[in-house]
Image (cartoon, rainbow, N blue to C red):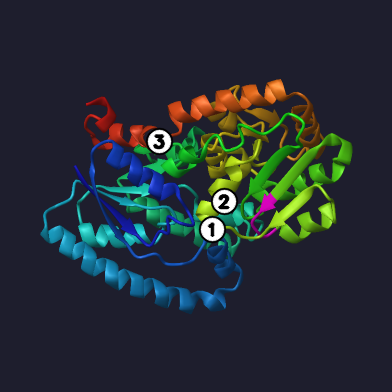
Amino acid sequence: MRIVAFGTYDSAVHPRVAVLIAGLRAWNQDVVELNRPLGYSTAERVTLVQEPWRLPGFGLRLLRRWASLVRLGLRERRRGRPDAVLVGYLGHFDVVLARLVFGRVPIVLDHLVSASGTVLDRGLASRRSLRGRVMVAIDRLALACADVVVVDTAERVPALAEGGRRDVVVCPVGASDEWFAASGAAADRGVDEPLRAIFFGLFTPLQGATTIARAAALLEPDDRVEITLVGRGQDWDEARRIVGDHPAVRWIEWLEPADLIRLVATQDVCLGIFGTTAKAREVVPTKVFQGAAAGCAVVTSDTASQRGVLGDDAAYVPPGDAEALAAVLRELSVDRGRLDSLRERMGERAAREFTAAEAVRPMMSEIGGITPVEEE
């Protein structure tokens, strides 16, 4: 099939769409990318909700990108009708344009996050507030323009089904080849070295960065645990206040993607999410798949969605429980046998289930794929 990947997505910032595209190509599909990155992250889009006077600038930039995408889309249509159009992550507006440009061509929307869910999760609006109702309307419009909706966990399907959707496909986030290629960087570290754990993200309530900070503050030098926190966002200031000048905690505000991959691959443990919000109970974060692919053991919150994907190959703690998180890190710093077992089992699961080809398998079943390259 010829599939058009369409939109203003930025795969360097949000790698989900890159994994989907790589997976489709692994299934021997002809994927044409028509992409004009908008340059607005999720956090910056959330800021627009708080500071609506910035909306004209956002709208102007979006229109410029769309003008280019219209030209590219019409040119692609002259080549012949594509079999499907994939609208990448953060495509709530792009999917509307895709419907206008490609007409009756099946549209697949990667609905990794909902606009309303993101705003509610970050405490920026209530469902009945004007902001909340606007976000709900944006979600409804985006979903109405799609023929197939892709989500990342089964826990998100019932809410869409209640709205009448029956064409929902669950595709795990997965990890790109670069993460798998980096695996093994920490294999030769000595047993006497401190346990290395890493968290990377945008410090949102969903991620539970303050829980990680409280756990770090509980650790003593004799616990032999080092934690690296990468990124910056909503809860960064509070997390920094909690940790203070703890000698075992390192802060890095930004890394290029390739540098982040190399760093994560040198760690023993990748920390997932620990938030207590409703959304935190529905998702399996990208960092969990990436850390697993890079060869780390995974420690994350004990939710149905994460257990459903990670099984018994991860270490779990109750959401928001800093004491339990600190205890698990202490245990793994002493019990290197368990640490090695978690790393090995999670690496095997990642190679079996988290590759790009496996991530898109449910999508291929929905839109009618052909034999994967590796199975020919």
Depth check, front residue: 224 or 63: 224
For the point 30% across and 37% down, which residue is it? 26
Q: Is residue 324 left or right of residue 129?
A: right
The overriding secondary structure of the stretch rendered in magenta is: loop
* Highlighted range, magenta: 229-234
Foreground label between 2 and 3: 2
Within 10 Å of disc 2 (Cα), the crowding (few <14, some 14-19, many 20+) is some
User: Which kind of residue does numbered mark 2 sit on?
Assistant: Leu
Q: Quadrant of the N terminus?
A: top left
Q: CA distance from mark 2 to mark 3?
A: 22 Å
If you read the primary sequence from the N terminus, does the residue marked by circle 3 or circle 1 appear first?
Answer: 1
Q: Viewer-proximal residue, 105 or 253?
A: 253
Q: How many marks?
A: 3
Mark in the foreground, 3 or 1? 1
**Residue 77 x %, y %:** 15, 59
Q: Which residue is mark 1?
A: 256
For residue 285, above or below residue 191: below
Which residue is identified by label 3?
A: 359
**Is any atom of residue 163 visible in this view?**
no
The reply to whether callout 3 and callout 1 are in contact (CB within 8 Å) is: no
Is 323 colored magenta in this rendering? no
Tag 2 secondary structure: helix
In the picture, the quarter occupied by the C terminus is: top left
Q: Is residue 210 left or right of residue 163?
A: right
Residue 283, disc? none
Mark 2 near mark 1, Cβ–Cβ under 8 Å?
yes
User: What's the amino acid at mark 3?
Assistant: Ala
- Residue 367 position by quadrant: top left
Residue underneath mark 2? 260
Magenta stretch: residue 230 in it? yes
